[in-house]
Image: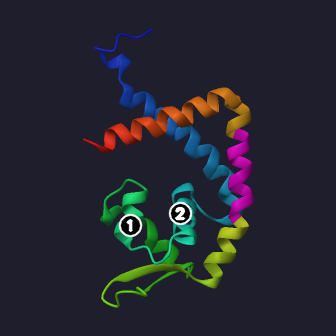
Amino acid sequence: MPRFDEPQGCACLQLRKVTRKVTQLYDRALVPAGLTTAQFSALSFVNRTPDPSVGDIAARLVMDPTTATRLLRPLMRDKLIELAPAAGDKRRRAVRLTPKGRKKFEEALPLWRAAQADLGKTLGRRRFRALWDTLETSLAQLAER
């Protein structure tokens, strides 16, 4: 067991290593759809959220708006999403799935589900659930900072 007051016990390093491994698993699964995990997450959020702004997407994915814009740029280039005036406020720009984007999301969803199942199988149901609960609680506590 590392000492938590020494660099070998760095929680940030451990989280980054786990995040890289998990991201690699999902990214490999999504290759046939031509999406990264982050792009799939953005498409998923846009798919289920009416008229989200770039700021809404950034907040959901816990990133700054500039990073969210860089994430969305290839999706716009590939015509998977578009920016349009929001329904309730024409001054606000909303991100929407295009028909091509909806089709791409539907193509990627079973691939994502397979990656999710693979991670669950690899970790085991109990550990997978414990990881989810720990991450959810940690995010909530860190959001207060």
Q: How many marks?
A: 2
State which region is magenta.
Answer: 108-118
What residue sits 61% from the left and 77% below the top? Answer: 101
Please report contact status of discs 1 and 2: CB closer than 8 Å, yes or no: no
Visual colour scheme: rainbow
**Disc 1 residue type (three-letter):** Asp
What residue sits 37% from the left and 31% below the top? Answer: 12
Residue 5: image quadrant is: top left
Judged from the image, the secondary structure of the residue bearing numbered disc 1 is helix
- Residue position for label 2: 39
Examine the rendered structure and indicate whether residue 55 appears above or below residue 1.
below
**Disc 2 residue type (three-letter):** Gln
Residue 88: which disc? none
Taking the view exactly as shown, the residue that stands out farthest to the front is 88
- In the rendered structure, the answer to whether residue 12 lies left or right of residue 39 reads left
What residue sits 43% from the left and 88% below the top? Answer: 87
Q: CA distance from mark 1 to mark 2?
A: 15 Å
What residue sits 45% from the left and 70% below the top? Answer: 72
User: Which x, y percent locates residue 13?
Assistant: 39, 29
Examine the rendered structure and indicate whether residue 127 appears above or below residue 110.
above
- Residue position for label 1: 56
